[in-house]
Image: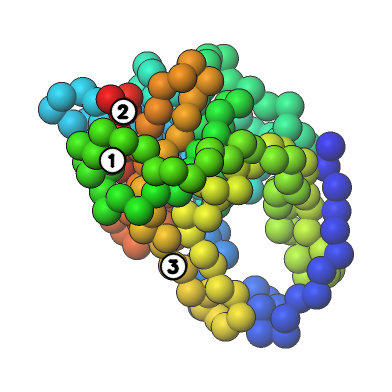
Amino acid sequence: MKTTCLFLVPALAVLTSCNGLFGGIYDEFDAAEKPAASSCFIARDADGKGGTLQVDVRPYTTWTFLDLHALQADTANTADSLASADPPFAWDIALHRWDVKTHGGSALSSNYGSVEEAVSAGTLPAEAFVADVDSAVVVDMSTMMEGYLGYSQSMVNPVLSQWIDIDTREMPPIYTLSGRVYIVQLTDGTRAALQFTNYMDDASRKGFATIRYRYPLP
């Protein structure tokens, strides 16, 4: 169910939105340029057990669903209810803007330096896996000038969604990657290692989540 919530808009944020200053800080995009979800798997490792993903997360009304088993992806336009959207295949993780959720799985944040290190470690961190929680996610920014945003309820994984920090206290915002390797436990008992390595594409457009992944972990 879509809801709206009031919030205070910093004066500088209003100016940047109205006057076009700091163009692109809100990741504006032309819907016609959005690539097909099937292009998310942009590179694969030689052994077939990993590679690189790049997901266009600029739209506020879209979840991109990823199936690590079959290496396929799909998007669902969910302007009214992010909670009810589901792709026509079994999926493992999904991204909406900077939010990430699992398909009934759980995740933890590790101290591994890379997904390759997670593969070779042979043991898991001692921290407990964290399941998804019901959250409010932004689906409509068009009413920002009126002092509120449109939200929808959806399950979100609080660990995976810490992959990036966006500091909006100054304009343009400061984007900081966590650099962490996340271990995701899927519902079939298998595990994947994910490391978010960029929030921009090769053209320096913000809103493209680049992910190194290895699946399945031994």
Residue 146 in view here: yes
Looking at the picture, which amino acid does disc 2 mark? Leu
Residue 172 picture location, percent across and down: 52, 78
**Residue 176 - label:** 3
Quarter assignment of residue 104: top right
Residue 207 vs residue 52, the one in the foreground? 52
> Under tag 1, what secondary structure?
helix
Looking at the picture, which amino acid does disc 3 mark? Thr
Query: Is disc 1 surrounded by few (<14), some (14 to 19) or many (20+) residues within 10 Å?
Result: many
Q: Relative to 205, is 72 above or below?
A: above
Query: Is disc 3 surrounded by few (<14), some (14 to 19) or many (20+) residues within 10 Å?
Result: few
**Residue 101 - label:** none
Residue 51 picture location, percent across and down: 25, 35
Q: Name the residue under label 2.
A: 217
Quarter assignment of residue 116: top left
Residue drawn 73% across the image and 45% down it:
135
> Under tag 3, what secondary structure?
strand
Query: Label 3 near label 1: C-beta < 8 Å?
Result: no
| Distance CA(mark 1)–CA(mark 3) | 22 Å
Q: Name the residue under label 1.
A: 118
Residue 101 in view here: no
Q: Earlier in the sequence, mark 2 or mark 3?
A: 3
Query: Label 1 near label 2: C-beta < 8 Å?
Result: yes
